[in-house]
Amino acid sequence: MIEIKHIKKFYGARTIVDDLSLTVKNGSVFGFLGQNGAGKTTTMKMMVGLASPDEGSITIGGKPSSDLSARESVGFMPEAPYFYDRLTGLEFLEFCGELFQKHKSGREYLGILKELGIYDARDRAINTYSKGMKQRLGFAQVLVNDPDYIFLDEPLDGLDPLGRREIKKIILELKARKKTIFFNSHILYDTEEICDEIGLIHEGKLLYSGSVKEFCKGRSLEERFVETVERERNTTTEESVVPAKAEIHAPKS
Amino acid sequence: MKNIFVIAKNTFRETIRDRILYGILGFSLIYVAITVLLAKISLNDPVVLKSFGLAGIYIFGSIITIFLGVSIIYKELERRTLYFVLSKPVSRLDVVVGKFLGLFTAIILTTLVMTVVYLGVIFYETGVLDALGLLAVFYQILEMGLFVALLVFFSTISTPLTSTIAAVMLIFGGHSFGAVLRTAAQVGGIFYRFIQAVYYVFPNLEKFDIRISAVHGIAPSGASVLLTIIYAILYSAVLLGLANFFLKRKEL
């Protein structure tokens, strides 16, 4: 289980994540949705140990996310990944795998590359890969340690429709193998298809966390997402206008 | 410990595939080879031959080290390749030490390639193996180790341009603080104390320069070799510790 309890993250005076709490059940696919700059990536970075929360705690499988041993069972794919360009795809995968205590054999790495459709490019330098191939390689390195918890930051970004379909298929296969998948996305159509639960974040605050069906109430995820975010935005604007009026009247009284 | 070697291996592999390395190495080999011509001009004086050869290995070794080391961690932070590494069970100290060892190994390898050519040229010209020249190269490798640690440290706190400027200044300063200190001793007072502080804080690269004595056949004592090795290891360890300190505080 992934448990986030009251985490806060500040960059200077700006609050990036504000008192966020949520729980992701084992074996489920959780879509973390929000606009650009909502705090999705920062939250994920805290979950995989790239950043640490200023307040609150995160546990993965009962271990604090800051604990190195917790990462033995974690796979993470960053958004728009950059690679060691002079390595080949296979060398990169081997490098990633060797960083874990328990890692796969050479044949298994080839199997992963086959699964992701980049086997033929295994011995080519990564700097010759297309954007879609790099995205697939980024996904491939997630699987090198057969993780129980998989974190994907915008996994479908930059992929063509066929590539998106393949990645979605793999996500569903991983789900069938009882893996817990947490992913960030702003492509809502795809999210609706593969998620059991979603979390909706806006300006660092969690607006909703629960099942997709319950959230959509018979409408499309995109429609409900836009409606919820706009409602929140209007509420925030009204709240910030009211004290301003009070300040104007204050000197007269 | 295993992760340090995995990162070192990856860094080494990346480094030796860098085209810049081969460009500079090519120039250095041409340079070492043409020292034969310089020797002919100086009536085959082996001192001239050895001086130019060892100086060439040092200059090109330093250029290669600066080019390859100046952005070793910085580019990983900028390009976010560290995301792949640090999201795995890898500590930031593993990254710092692994990057250091990988780059240092590549530097040792390129220095040895230049040294083999140098020793070949000397043997061809004089008929003897330049053992003291080899010791001078060993000292240079120690200096490069310290220098790689310095560059790893710089690349965690500043941009490649700033690091390059600082590195060049430190090479120059590190080889002249001894002379400056001797001059300052004659002046005395606060100025001397200031120079003394600078002398002890910044790396004293003069310790690693035995090229002049080597070409004249003067060997350093065993104790001196040992002290130089200890100095290089301790100074490098402190720099890597500082690099780890700053990298830990970096928000990715």
Image (spheres, helix red, strand yellow):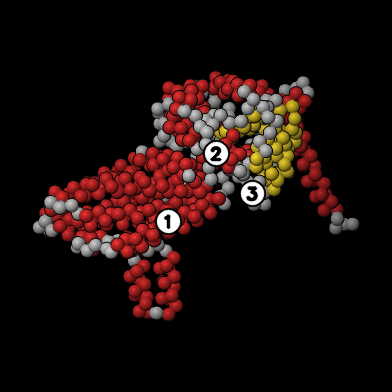
Which one is in front, A82 or A236?
A82
Q: CA distance from mark 1 to mark 3?
A: 33 Å
Q: Amino acid at mark 2?
A: Lys
Q: Chain of mark 2?
A: B
Q: Which residue is mark 1?
A: B236
Q: Earlier in the sequence, mark 2 or mark 1?
A: 2
Picture residue at 72% right of the left edge, 41% below the top: A5
Say if labels 2 and 3 share a chain. no
Where residue A208 sits: x, y (%)? Answer: 75, 33
Alpha-carbon neighbours of circle 2 within 10 Å: few (<14), some, or many (≥20)? many
Residue under pointer 3 = A11
Subunit bearing disc 3: A
Residue A239 on image: x %, y %: 80, 44
The answer to which quarter of the image holds residue A59 is top right
Q: Position of residue A161 (x, y in %)?
A: 56, 21
| Placement of the C terminus of chain B among the 4 image quadrants | top right
User: What residue sits 82% from the left and 49% below the top?
Assistant: A243
User: Which residue, given by chain and number where applicable, does mark 2 sit on?
Assistant: B88
Camera-side residue: A59 or A237?
Answer: A59
Q: Amino acid at mark 3?
A: Tyr
Q: Label 1 is placed on what type of residue?
A: Ser
